[in-house]
Amino acid sequence: AYESLEGERSGIVITFVMIFVLISVVLLLAAVTLGLMVATRLVQPVSQLITGAERVRDGDLSFRVPLDGQGDELEALSRAFNRMTAQLETQRNELIAANRLNDERRRFTEAILGGVTAGVIGLDPARKIDLPNRSASDLLGVDLEDYLAQELTDVIPEFQPLFDDFSRDGDRSKPRQIEIRRDGVNLTLMARVTAEWADDGTVFGYVVTFDDVTELQTAQRMAAWADVARRIAHEIKNPLTPIQLSAERLKRRYLKQITDDQEVFTTCTDTIIRQVSDIGRMVDEFSSFARMPSPTMRLENIGELVKSAVFLQKQAHSNITYDFDRSGIEDLQISCDAHQVNQCLTNTLKNAAEAIEGREKPEEGELPPGKIEISVAVSPDNQRVFVAVSDNGKGLPAEHRERLTEPYVTTRSKGTGLGLAIVKKIMEDHGGELILSDGVESGATITLSFPKVVEAEIDSVASDAHSSGN
């Protein structure tokens, strides 16, 4: 039996070895599986955290790490990560909403600044241009967008007194009139500067606001002068006729009775009559300016109106050459009051003639012959009709030229200063414009700009006239 078992020992050993190997392999596989399970349990939350961090870095704050409910440290870390991303998402949404609201307010503010007629310029603490609106550039005649980050007083030196007042008055300056000259025209601006204060009491910017009050001041002066003209005409006109009649009666009755210094008596009475006549003419101009009637609009041939005015001036100033070419404008019509437009043309031609007569004779040589050129043209856009009167007279002054259209402002010693004021008033009543400019070579050019009548308006006026006739 021993020998039999001894002979089978190798097989039993192999069997035991195989069983041992099998059990070892099973245990190894179980250990590896258990290790992988434990590793997966440890690594999966970390991997999810890594994935979440990558998603957050890419801007996806809505990502949340799944929770397994184990209640261990990794789950606590995941909860903290989710709270962090939730808070970041909430803050980002609030910032986006605030930025959207700020953008809407900024666009609304820019729309307001772009729509207002007043000029508004935002400055930084160093008084450098930061945010100008379009009206500011238009009023100043400078594109302020090209001068960003430059000091306002360097670009527009006329604003320096405004900041001097601000330094003296405090955080808000008083309104100040500023005179600027752009393209040969003087403008009057009413300006104010206001400081923007931070919570710590420092200035973080300035706002300069201004508006063009040139036309307002002109209108105020016109209204004031019109009132003065009414009072003068009322107070002076009444005694003029008795004075003139008394002087004429004295001359008729006592001229033959005076034997000594009869010539002196005649000269004195003639002077009284002449001066009363001059004063009467001036009073008539006052009355005309003070009580300008409303225009009665009718279709008129502008060429005929100009021709009539030129003909009258030719008779009065035979020493001046009048050049008026009517070719191409025979049927050109405008809607106007013929009497008032004729008054405009007469005053304009009269001013041109007086400018020629007021020329100073040069030290050497002779003055060129007086010449006045009249032209009628239509604007390129077919919207306006221009009547230009050019002369070779002494020209217009370079300074304060725009004030020539104000009452009682004149460059002539014998002028009343009402001619151009009346012309401007009539042109404004007609929806037109009075333009003063220098001549091509010498003298001046005065242009009357009228709205052009379109075909539909001509038919409408003709229909109204036909209906009223029936």
Image: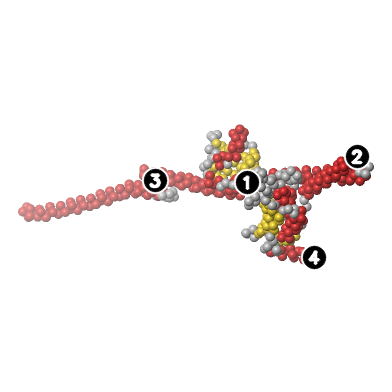
Q: Are marks 4 and 2 in contact (CB under 8 Å)?
A: no
Mark 4, mark 2: which one is toward the viewer? 2
What residue type is disc 4 on?
Gly
Mark 4, mark 3: which one is toward the viewer? 4
Mark 2, mark 3: which one is toward the viewer? 2
Residue occupying the point 66% across, 45% down: 364
- Mark 1 neighbour class, 10 Å CA radius: few under 14, some 14 to 19, many 20 or more: few
Which x, y percent locates residue 293? 78, 52
Q: Are marks 2 and 1 in contact (CB under 8 Å)?
A: no
- Mark 4 neighbour class, 10 Å CA radius: few under 14, some 14 to 19, many 20 or more: few
Which mark is on residue 469?
4
Q: Mark 4 and mark 3: span between their CA atoms? A: 96 Å
- Tell me if residue 73 can be seen: yes
Q: Which residue is mark 3?
A: 78
Task: Assign the N terminus to one quadrant of the image.
Answer: bottom left
Q: Is residue 201 left or right of residue 353?
A: left
What residue type is disc 1 on?
Gly
Q: Secondary structure at mark 1?
A: loop
Q: Which residue is mark 2?
A: 260
Q: Earlier in the sequence, mark 4 or mark 1?
A: 1
What residue type is disc 2 on?
Asp
Question: Which residue is at the front of the view, 417 or 83?
Answer: 417
What residue type is disc 3 on?
Ser
Q: Secondary structure at mark 4?
A: helix
Q: Is residue 332 left or right of residue 140?
A: right
Q: Which residue is mark 1?
A: 184
Which x, y percent locates residue 432? 69, 54
Q: Mark 1 and mark 3: span between their CA atoms? A: 75 Å
- Mark 3 neighbour class, 10 Å CA radius: few under 14, some 14 to 19, many 20 or more: many
In this rendering, the answer to whether 160 lies above or below 443 is: above
Q: Mark 4 and mark 2: span between their CA atoms? A: 68 Å
